Amino acid sequence: MALSSYRMHRIYLAATMNYGLGSDDPEELAYYNKIREEIEDMKKDTVKKGIPLNWDTPEGMDK
């Protein structure tokens, strides 16, 4: 049986807020663990902040 959109949303909220699931259903646990893994992967990626500055202006644009 597939998870309903309501149940998926509740599991997503629990996973993103770092709450326990409180269920023994294997399908719900698999979805919860999948989301937790994706969150951990996002934390490992570096975030590039700021705007790169390019001081080399092409000819004619500095006028």
Image: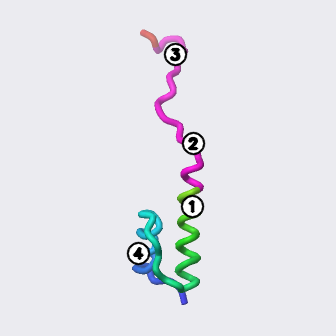
Residue under label 2: 46
Please tell me which of labels 2 and 1 falls first in the chain: 1
The residue located at (57%, 42%) in the rendering is 46
Q: CA distance from mark 4 to mark 3?
A: 49 Å
Q: Label 3 near label 4: C-beta < 8 Å?
A: no
Please tell me which of labels 2 and 4 falls first in the chain: 4
> Looking at numbered disc 1 in the image, what kind of residue is underneath it?
Glu
Q: Label 4 near label 1: C-beta < 8 Å?
A: no
Residue under label 1: 38
Decide whether residue 56 is among the magenta residues: yes
The residue located at (57%, 61%) in the rendering is 38
Residue under label 4: 10
Residue under label 3: 55
- Mark 3 residue crowding within 10 angstroms, few (<14) / some (14–19) / many (20+): few
Q: CA distance from mark 3 to mark 2?
A: 25 Å
The residue located at (49%, 35%) in the rendering is 49
- Mark 1 residue crowding within 10 angstroms, few (<14) / some (14–19) / many (20+): few
Q: Position of residue 41 (x, y in %)?
A: 59, 55
> Looking at numbered disc 2 in the image, what kind of residue is underneath it?
Thr
Q: Label 1 near label 3: C-beta < 8 Å?
A: no
> Looking at numbered disc 3 in the image, what kind of residue is underneath it?
Trp
Q: Secondary structure at mark 4?
A: helix
Q: CA distance from mark 2 to mark 1?
A: 14 Å
